[in-house]
């Protein structure tokens, strides 16, 4: 009986220490402090950008894929003005929404950058995933820059490439 009690206690201890690994992240502790109410800032100009991202690419043939880690880099290119990110929505290959980042607008100070990381094990986006990023800037402020950096390493071989956003509105 002592043996079973001991095994039960060890099992409970191991399970209680196991933390679910997040497969896509943004530093929520830091950015939850950056939520901002922009309803009173009516002179801001609205923009919307499209960014292609790849959580998988084809390898050898159309029947084999290679998983990638993706870093979505969200950059304020202004050295004077604060900009506001309204939403970053992630879509899969078929155009279905996977998840939305920033439940409320956040700000980026001049020259500041933040990232969204999509881990290599997160293949929900597939080979044709993408983001729609909505933002607002003060008049005459440079547009923000959004880039996707995809990479992976297997053994001694590394693979990396980048994409840049395109303004669609």
Image (cartoon, rainbow, N blue to C red):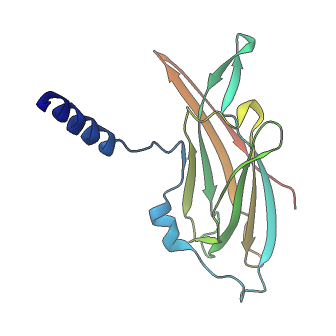
Q: Residue furthest left?
A: 2
Identify the residue at image location x=56%, y=53%: 115
Q: Is residue 160 left or right of residue 137?
A: left
| Residue 68, placed above or below residue 71 | above
Q: Is residue 9 left or right of residue 143?
A: left
| Number of marks present in the image shown | 0
Q: Residue furthest bottom?
A: 40
| Quarter of the rendering occupied by the C terminus | bottom right
Is 128 in front, or is 77? 128
Q: Residue furthest front?
A: 1
Identify the residue at image location x=76%, y=40%: 92
- Quarter of image, res 87: bottom right
Q: Position of residue 105 (x, y in %)?
A: 65, 71
| Quarter of the rendering occupied by the N terminus | top left
Q: Position of residue 13 (x, y in %)?
A: 25, 41
| Residue 136, placed above or below residue 151 | below
Is 148 in front, or is 17? 17
Q: Position of residue 107 (x, y in %)?
A: 60, 72
Identify the residue at image location x=60%, y=78%: 36
Identify the residue at image location x=74%, y=30%: 127
| Residue 89, placed above or below residue 155 | below
- Quarter of image, res 101: bottom right
- Quarter of image, res 64: top right
């Amino acid at each position: 009986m002592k043996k079973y009690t001991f095994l039960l206690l060890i099992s409970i201890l191991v399970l209680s220490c196991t933390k679910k690994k997040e497969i896509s992240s943004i530093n929520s502790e830091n950015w939850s402090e950056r939520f901002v109410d922009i309803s009173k800032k009516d002179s801001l100009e609205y923009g919307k950008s499209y960014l292609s991202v790849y959580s998988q690419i084809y390898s050898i043939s159309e029947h084999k894929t290679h998983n990638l880690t993706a870093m979505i880099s969200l950059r304020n290119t202004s050295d004077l003005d604060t900009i506001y990110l309204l939403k970053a929505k992630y879509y899969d290959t078929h155009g279905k929404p996977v998840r939305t980042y920033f439940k409320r607008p956040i700000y980026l100070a001049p020259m500041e950058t933040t990232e969204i990381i999509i881990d290599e094990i997160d293949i929900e986006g597939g080979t044709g995933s993408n983001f729609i990023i909505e933002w607002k800037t003060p008049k005459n402020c440079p547009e923000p820059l959004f880039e996707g950096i995809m990479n992976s390493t297997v053994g001694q071989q590394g693979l990396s490439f980048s994409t840049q956003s395109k303004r669609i509105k």
